Amino acid sequence: MATAKLKGINKFIYDFKRYLPLLQNLVGRDFKVKYRRSFLGVAWSVLNPLFTMLVLTSVFKVLLKLQIENFATFYIIGSTLWNFFAESTSGSMSSVVSAAPLIKKVYIPKYMFPLEKCLFSLVNFLFSMIAAVAVMLIQGVYPTWTMLLFPLPVIYVFIFSCGLSLVLSALTVYFRDVVHLYGVLLTLWTYLTPILYDDKFLTGHKLIETVVHLNPMYYYVTYFRNVMMYNTLPTLNDNLICLCIALGTLIIGALVFNKAQKKFILHI
């Protein structure tokens, strides 16, 4: 059993190294396709979160009098990380199905396709962070040493997204309706993630507070804000929670995908 697992790991490493150039080409292709014939090009990845922030700041801060200090920074930091997760998982869902012509012709490790979507979303996220940093500086939220921990929550979300993407892409091969159902779930998930509100908003709503605290993205968004905005050093417990959720999801995703991919060819 141990020998078989070792062979499986070695094969995974070998395949990953062999097809790494393909992975890079797929990310580059998606990048070119997204911004093809776009007047603003890559700049749209910076302007889009800025425009969205301006609209929502006007609605929630000015019209609804939401009392959150530096609300524009508060929102854009949370939404940028959330959009990274949402784009990764949504884009990955149909990645295997869309690659059917290629899969039928040559052997390619099928996990490459959802992984590529997550990497592509990571690139977009990094561009979006330019907008987030600009808003921070405008509002007087200046860099602190805790911002050096910026990669940690991003890595956690990337691992979590990869794990969930493996599950979703495998399910989509068998059940195309998963795409539509996940769209509804993602909308609900957005409101259960503290992007437009903080914990004070949940005071007195025990049931909602419990549900929100069961949401993995609650911990990632809170962690990200703490290091980027509040100069707060995350505890060991914070890191363990984030890491365990991410790795647990990745392991489950890998197991589900590995078992399901054996019959992909019959359904794509």
Image (tube, helix red, strand yellow):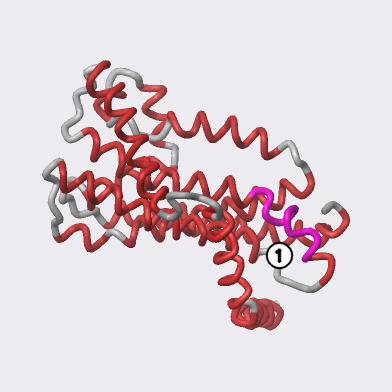
Name the quadrant containing residue 157.
bottom left
At mark 1, the secondary structure is: loop
The percent position of residue 148, horizontal first and vertical second, equals 22, 63
The percent position of residue 97, horizontal first and vertical second, equals 75, 53
Q: Residue at x 51, y 29 (%)?
A: 188
Residue at the far right in the pictured view: 266
Amino acid at dot 1: Lys
Q: Would you say 181 lies left or right of 236 here?
A: right
Q: Residue at x 37, y 48 (%)?
A: 220
> Magenta stretch: residue 97 in it?
yes
Q: Residue at x 55, y 60 (%)?
A: 32
Whether residue 219 is situated above or below residue 262 in the rendered picture: above
Q: Would you say 204 lies left or right of 193 here?
A: left
Which sits in the foreground, 244 or 53? 53
Q: Which residues are magenta?
A: 93-102
> Magenta stretch: residue 96 in it?
yes
For the stretch drawn in magenta, the main secondary structure is: helix
Which sits in the foreground, 172 or 201? 172
Which sits in the foreground, 30 or 90? 30
Q: Which residue is mark 1?
A: 110
The percent position of residue 111, horizontal first and vertical second, equals 66, 64
Q: Is residue 2 visible?
A: no
Name the quadrant containing residue 185.
top right
Q: Is residue 133 visible?
A: yes
Q: Residue at x 56, y 72 (%)?
A: 24
